[in-house]
Amino acid sequence: MADFPLSLLSFFAMSYTETVPKIIDESRQGEAFYSPHIQLDKPIDIKRFYIESYGCQMNFSDSEIVASILSGCGYTPTREVEEADLILLNTCSIREKAEETVRKRLRTIDKIKLARPGSMVGILGCMAERLKKSLLEEEKLVDLVVGPDAYRDLPNLLQRVEDGDKGINVYLSKEETYADISPVRLESNGVTAFISIMRGCDNMCSFCVVPFTRGRERSRDPFTIVSEAEHLFEKGYREVTLLGQNVDSYKWQHPETKENYTFARLLELVAHVHPKLRIRFSTSHPKDMTDDVLEMMARYDNICKYIHLPVQSGSSRILSLMNRTYDRDWYINRVESIRRIVPDCTISSDIIAGFCTETKEDHQDTLSMMAWADYCMSYMFMYSERPGTLAARKYKDDVEEEVKKSRLSEIIALQNSISRNHNLRDEGKVFSVLIEGDSRKSDTEFKGRNTQNKVVVFGKQPGYKPGDYVNVLIESSTSATLIGRIV
Ligand code: SAM
Ligand code: SF4
């Protein structure tokens, strides 16, 4: 699943209040979790926690699990970092820049902690897992370091900190899926939600730190996934996104009957929750995406016709160095299957510019693949060497920074023009759109998405509310948005 591209990270802006700078967040990076709906087990002696999330959707989803665990031990959330007894950053290590962002944020948090003696600061997620104890040595004001599989231990670790010690748990589990924890939903639009269906990753893409920070792949009990989806539907949610690093390799065996559950089977179970509950999923790995998943998508109207299928590079030579275990022809074959079995499906991608030894010809292969695959959207990154990965150990990061930058710019420019044409082709069509809430620019307009995951903006009409499906005629578009009216 993609986290946010470098180009978006650069939208970060700091606005300075009298005391504390806050992040103004265009892309959800560093978003503070808040939910007014938490019921405390212990209403007396209220302590407040503040949590910011960085990186991929999995981290945002994990913050909801953390919120649930904290609400069980006397904590209530706050939006105000300055009034928090416990400040948590749920961090990302995927690129160097992601870690730098967190380090910068810690300089501000140091000041807050000094101004509020007794408050605690914790680092959660991938940076905690990657840097372990050294994080406590480098960041003197950090009290807690907790890896992605150790959130159940938070109450104990907090007690340890309250007793004057430091709290660290970076144990990676082979079983933990938090299946029994009901996540406290981020104060969202009340219409769309994420459900983690698996954790970790068993692939060893040479550029990627995820297998080291999130551990071995394990799939969650499908019946807990279905009941979470049912519960969300009852509460008014109308779309769930099933999350995993490689959803196509989902596999679960019933402990008693020994029946096997594949991703295609899980999709079908969730599709049966209700015809009005839309299902999305992310991320699909080209090596594992099978036709039975595509056939399931074609069979159920409520499984959205959109696949995030990261190519990373269009060059077979680079794909082999990346250890992606597919080549250009294999990828093309997968896209052809999508077009054959789910003809109205849109496809998006992740692309890395300037991986080790990438030549002009390799880069041209990426551009030609983008044009051929006709991606509706892509997350685009410059290669960032990560310590400990296969690529860091085996290959030289030998593409000059300037060359990486210029290749990334070309990739972004090409994607913009492909997206523009994609959306122009949708003008004049009518789509069923799930209303998610007000558009960013105006409260006289709604924003929603069609099944192909395209953002649609349209004028409000009486009688419609978030969570409703409406038919919208597309009258104009930009490269990022379809604009229309209810018909
Ligand atoms: N599991 C997903 C897959 O295999 O497609 C990807 C998960 S990763 C969190 C999201 C994206 O970050 C990757 O698809 C890749 O494009 C990008 N990425 C990962 N490591 C990177 C690195 N070292 N430098 C630049 N981009 C990287
Ligand atoms: Fe990283 Fe590859 Fe696993 Fe995706 S599939 S999380 S890129 S190792």
Image (tube, helix red, strand yellow):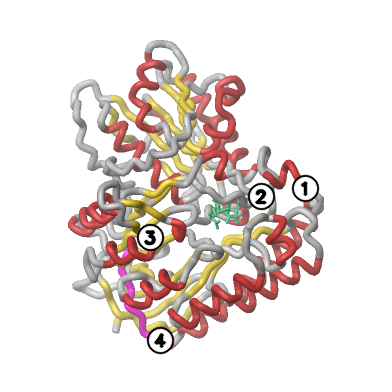
Mark in front: 2 vs 3: 3
Horizontal and vertical percent position of residue 193: 33, 55
- The kind of residue tagged 2 is Ser
Q: Is residue 485 magenta?
A: no
Whether residue 450 is visible to the viewer of this picture, yes or no, is no
Q: Which residue is mark 4?
A: 429
| Span shown in magenta | 428-437
Horizontal and vertical percent position of residue 15: 52, 42
Q: Earlier in the sequence, mark 3 or mark 4?
A: 3
Q: Nearer the viewer, residue 381 or 146?
A: 146
- The kind of residue tagged 3 is Thr
Q: Which mark is residue 395?
A: 1
Query: How far apart, in angstroms, are the residues tagged by discs 4 and 2?
Result: 42 Å
* Secondary structure beneath label 1: loop
Mark in front: 4 vs 2: 2
Q: Which mark is residue 206?
A: 2
Query: How far apart, in angstroms, are the residues tagged by discs 3 and 4?
Result: 35 Å
Mark in front: 3 vs 1: 3
Whether residue 75 is visible to the viewer of this picture, yes or no, is yes
Q: Nearer the viewer, residue 392 or 33?
A: 392
Image quadrant in which the C terminus is located: bottom left
Q: Earlier in the sequence, mark 1 or mark 2?
A: 2
Query: How far apart, in angstroms, are the residues tagged by discs 1 and 2?
Result: 9 Å
- The kind of residue tagged 4 is Lys
Residue 353 vs 385, above or below: the answer is: below
Q: Is residue 429 magenta?
A: yes
Q: Residues within 10 Å of mark 4 (few under 14, many from 20)?
A: few
Residue 244 vs 416, above or below: the answer is: above
Q: Which residue is mark 3?
A: 262
Q: Residues within 10 Å of mark 3 (few under 14, many from 20)?
A: some
Compared across the picture, whether 172 is left or right of 268 comes to right
Residue drawn 56% across the image and 48% down it = 12
